[in-house]
Image (spheres, helix red, strand yellow):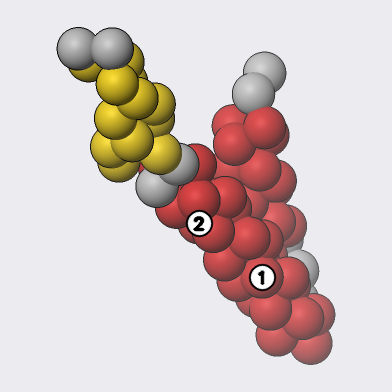
Amino acid sequence: MNTIQTEINKCDKLANSYYNLDASGKRRAAGDWLEQVRKTAKMINNRSNKPIMNVQNGFLDSTLC
C-alpha cells in the first residue's frame, strides 16, 4: 500500500474513533483527526506539485504535472 493511502486510512480510523467516543473525548479526537487530514493534504499537494523532467529535442524541460 502506498504512503498516501496509508495516511488516508489513518484519517478514516480517526474519524471512526470520533463517533465512538463520549462527549468529553470528542474535542481531542477532532483535533487529532484535523491534524492528520492536514498532514495528508500536505503530502498530496507536495506530490502533485513535483516537477517532471521531460527530454524534448535533446534538452531537459522541467514542467509541472
Would you place residue 14 above or below residue 44 in this image? Answer: below
For marks 1 and 2, the one nearer the N-term is: 1
Would you place residue 15 above or below residue 22 in this image? Answer: above
Question: Residue at the left extreme?
Answer: 57
At 79% from the left and 87% from the top, the residue drawn is 24
Apparent side of residue 58 relative to residue 26 in the rendered image (left or right): left
Would you place residue 22 above or below residue 2 in this image? Answer: below
At 34% from the left and 25% from the top, the residue drawn is 60
Of the pair 41 and 50, the residue shown nearer to us: 50
Of the pair 25 and 35, the residue shown nearer to us: 35
Of the pair 9 and 62, the residue shown nearer to us: 62
Apparent side of residue 2 relative to residue 54 in the rendered image (left or right): right
Of the pair 51 and 62, the residue shown nearer to us: 62
Can see residue 15? no
Q: Residue 58: x and y, percent?
A: 28, 12
* Residue, disc 2: 41
User: The residue tagged with tag 2: helix, strand or loop?
Assistant: helix
User: The residue tagged with tag 1: helix, strand or loop?
Assistant: helix
Q: Residue 35: x and y, percent?
A: 66, 70
Would you place residue 22 above or below residue 50 in this image? Answer: below
- Can you say which quadrant of the picture contains the C terminus? top left
